Amino acid sequence: MTDEIRTRIESELEVKTYLQNLKFALNNGAKINFQVKRYVDTNRDERYTNQYTVNMLFPDENPLDALRRELLKLSVEDYMRTVKDIRFPKRSEKREFGKIYNDTEDVYIKIRVELLGMYGSMTTFIMSFHFAEKAFIPAMFPYKKQ
């Protein structure tokens, strides 16, 4: 499947609505599932792994508390694109965001929010929260104010 088919840019209103729903869920008991160790990290430079990034950015904090706070800060300007999961097509789409930390550190963030279980408890899956392997450029952010 080509990248164009798997990815799309949602409208600004769709992204704002998604973030509003994410923040509501996070403020109302949504569970965070953070992938600390990922199979894809096996041969990756450690600097670009979730665990390394979270340890470097938030060394004295509980990682889940830090990540919850950081997700609550996401804005439409941080949005990059929406990705269809080709491995699990019945699951919800993933959203990709990018933020700059310490004025110089580009951090790539990929999340999926799903209703799980019989009673519909919200879970936020953080697939990626790591230093970006390629520097961000303005064209990657459709709603970033210049």
Image (cartoon, rainbow, N blue to C red):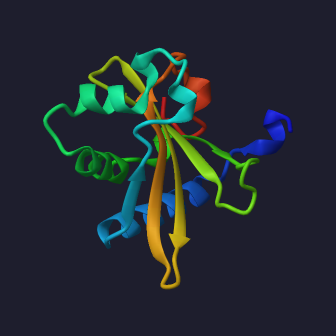
Q: Residue furthest right?
A: 1
| Left/right of residue 126 with respect to residue 70 in the rendered view | right
- Depicted 29 relative to depicted 11: above or below: below
- Depicted 129 relative to depicted 105: above or below: below
**Residue at the (30%, 20%) spot, across then down:** 103
Pick the quarter of the image with the N terminus: top right
**Residue at the (85%, 35%) spot, across then down:** 2
- Depicted 32 relative to depicted 9: above or below: below
Total labels drawn:
0
Give the image location of residue 112, x and y in percent: 54, 54
Give the image location of residue 88, x and y in percent: 71, 54
Give the image location of residue 13, x and y in percent: 58, 59
**Residue at the (36%, 20%) spot, across then down:** 105
Q: Residue furthest bottom?
A: 119
For residue 24, which quarter of the picture?
bottom left
For residue 31, which quarter of the picture?
bottom left
| Left/right of residue 33 with respect to residue 144 in the rendered view | left
- Depicted 95 relative to depicted 129: above or below: below
Give the image location of residue 7, x and y in percent: 73, 42
**Residue at the (83%, 43%) spot, across then down:** 5
| Left/right of residue 102 with respect to residue 40 in the rendered view | left
